[in-house]
Image: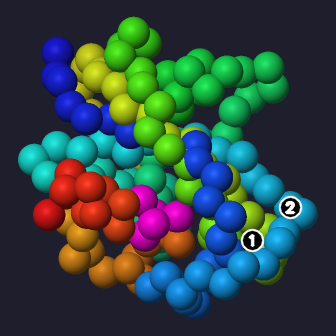
Amino acid sequence: MRRSLLLLTVACISFHIHPSDAFGTMASKPSAAFIDKLALILVRNRKQLVVRSRGKDAFFTPGGKREEGESDEDALCRECKEELTIGIKRDTIKRYGTFQAQAFGKPEGTMVRMTCYEADYTGELKESFEIEEMKWITSDFEHRYLTVTGIMILDDLKAKGLID
């Protein structure tokens, strides 16, 4: 059994960040289209875990969309099992925050809103059939390999002193 900081982001920051502006110049811009996702942020040894899906170039914060009728807790547990082969200890799940930005690879104006939690887990982290690569990163990881929300999460973790 491992005990680590696990964060899943569901926060609502009303900023619009274009992927080409990944370093954070945030301009207000309303948007009607939202993709509601859960994102697992796992921190160990002052590094954050990111993953790259099969056939993709960018690294993502592990997680995904809720299935119909699924709670955040249920979706978090399912996504962690599917992508990272770990079991989330439900009684340790704590809300962390919310991040919102232009959705990676989607039409301009399509926003992603991600929900974050921290929790403990059981099992061994392994890439599942969905994941081609896992990587532990620090704040100096090249932003061009991350999604905009991934950069926002990385910056937040650094600002809070949780990663190097």
Front residue (pair 28, 150) = 28
Graded by Cα atoms within 10 Å as few (under 14), some (14 to 19) or many (20 or more), the crowding at tag 1 reads: few
Gap in angstroms between the C-alphas marked 2 and 1: 10 Å
In the image, what residue occupies the spot 53% across and 72% down?
148
Which of pointers 2 and 1 indicates the residue nearer the eye? 2
Query: Mark 2 vs mark 1: which is more N-terminal?
Result: 2
Q: Relative to residue 63, is residue 118 depicted above or below?
A: above
Residue, disc 2? 33
Q: Quadrant of the N terminus?
A: top left
In the image, what residue occupies the spot 64% across and 52% down?
12
SS category of the residue bearing label 2: strand
- Mark 2 vs 1: CB contact within 8 A: yes
Three-letter amino acid code of the residue under disc 2: Ala
Residue, disc 1? 106
- Is 84 left, or right, of 24 in this rendering? left
SS category of the residue bearing label 1: loop
Three-letter amino acid code of the residue under disc 1: Lys
